[in-house]
Image (spheres, rainbow, N blue to C red):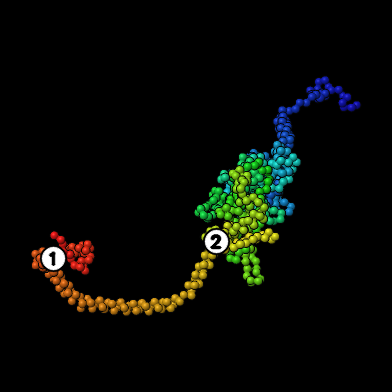
Amino acid sequence: MAERDIPPAEDSEIPRAAARKPGLRWLQPVWIIPIVAALIGAWLAFQHYIDRGPTIEIRFRTAEGLEAGKTRIKYKDVDIGIVRHITLAEDRKGVIVTAEMVKQASRALLVEDSRFWVVRPRISGGRVSGLGTLLAGAFIGLDPGKSSVERREFEGLETPPVVTEGLPGRAFRLTADDVGSLDLGSPVYFRGVSAGQVVSTEVSKDGSQVIVGVFVDAPFDRFVTPSSRFWNASGVDLSLDASGLKVNTESMISVLVGGIAFDNPTDVQGPSANANDLFVLWNDRATAMKPRDRVLEDYAMYFDRSVRGLVVGAPVDFRGITIGEVSQIDLEYLPDKVNFRTRIDIHFFPDRLKPHARDGTLKAGGPDMPPEERMRKFVANGFRAQLRDSNLLTGSLYVAFDFFPDAPAATIDFRQSPPTLPTAPGGGISDLQQSIGRILGRLEKVPFDAIGEDLRKSLEQLRATLKNADSLAQHLDKDVTPELKKTLEQARRTLEEAQKAVSEDSPVQTDLRDTLDEVTRASRSLRALVDFLERHPDALLRGRRQEEP
């Protein structure tokens, strides 16, 4: 019989286990805290995954100032990302910066034309930027583009952009032979007021010019018209003319770091220029603001004298008015004379000889006739060209036209290209120099040595004569002077005796008075005789008639 079938003794004291059906088991309180923590962690991880922004890569030349886990990416001083990793590029020509962006930066900021750069302390164009990074450290700046195409890989800029997106104003392009002292950030002035800055400089594709990009801030951009003139305002512009020394400069900043200025010609109005329009960057204000003539006539002229001091661009003057400019200077050989002459080509502006009203319209009465007829008439009446000195200090020359009625007759041949205008001699310091040279040549022929020798002999003779005169004076002083004194003393005594003799009380004076009375009576008798003879001239022959009683 099995053991389990043996019934227990009734009087046994040993307890026995009784089988029972299992019930519902409850979770112990100790497990609540770990479970809640796990749920919160899962929720945070899920929330972080949902809120996490895109990851981008930016390529820079160096990682100077950048640090993983600390360097921020900012837009308008707001944190929008953080650098997570910095690795060396595969080509070892740069570094790859991996950054994690906030979710809001996914579509609005990360597009194809967005730009990134490292913000560090910089001095450029006379401006200091990034000083705040000296304490807080460098950060990466962002300038969002306008494209609608998203992007995750970017090429970082080595220098920060001068103009960022959203800045009011317009950009323009300028062409120049060289940039001079211009640099990125150099100021742009409008009538002395800072109105923009230089944003780019690049060489044209053919390498013949430099293209300078400028950005003109609003509201100054509306003053840029198709007729605006831009010029290089860098440094100090010195000019010396008839009115004296002139010094022009925009500001001390432009003297140190360069600058550009622009303005519009007087009385010229027009609509504002379009963005990215192309202008010419002139060297100075005077060149930029010169009138631009649309009608040009080309002429040539010949001179047998030196043209040192005359340059291309020199003015062609007519009684103080600029009517053209020198376009070319060449030297021509004359085989028959075995000599050279200088050929000067000019651009002639005929419209400047016509009177204009203040509004620019042409007045009646000017030389409005065909060019050939006008110039033939001018030449026939003595229209001639001369080279004259523009500045005695610099020795510069210019071409001057005027009418010379006594000039030899001349004609102009319009079959030549360009026609040749007659010239007149004189009008410059060189002619004065030639005259002085001729005078000096004549002076060289004067026998100054012989004249000097004769003068020396004459001086020796004069010295001997003066010596003899001195001896004579000494002899007169020793021998003649005492005798002369005695003679003068005797003459004085004689004069005193004569004065006593002619005094009123002296006998001589009485006798002299009686004598004068006798002479008076005699003269009266003589006068009566003359009167009688005038009445009776026959008395000289017949004698005096006897008067009747």
- On screen, residue 465 versus residue 315, left or right, reads left
**Around disc 2, counting alpha carbons within 10 Å, would you say few (fewer than 14), some (14 to 19), or many (20 or more)?**
some
Residue 324 position in % (x across, y down): 61, 55
Q: Residue at x 68, y 59 (%)?
A: 414
**Residue type for callout 2:** Gly
Quadrant location, the N terminus = top right
Residue 84 visible from this viewpoint: no
Q: Locate residue 119, reporting x and y percent.
A: 63, 46
Mark 1 lies on residue: 518
The CA span between labels 2 and 1 is 90 Å
Seen in the picture, residue 291 relative to 456 is either above or below; the reply is: above
Would you say residue 59 is visible in this rendering? yes
Q: Secondary structure at mark 1?
A: helix
Looking at the rendered structure, the secondary structure element under dot 2 is loop
Give residue 398's position: percent from left, percent from top. Answer: 58, 58
Crowd band around label 1 with a 10 angstrom C-alpha radius: few (<14), some (14–19), many (20+): few
Identify residue type, mark 1: Glu
Question: Residue at point 63% right, 41% down?
Answer: 222
Question: Label 2: which residue?
Answer: 427
Foreground residue among 3 and 260: 260
Residue at the spot 81% in from the left edge and 20% down from the top edge: 11
Asked whether, in this view, residue 13 is left or right of residue 244, the answer is right
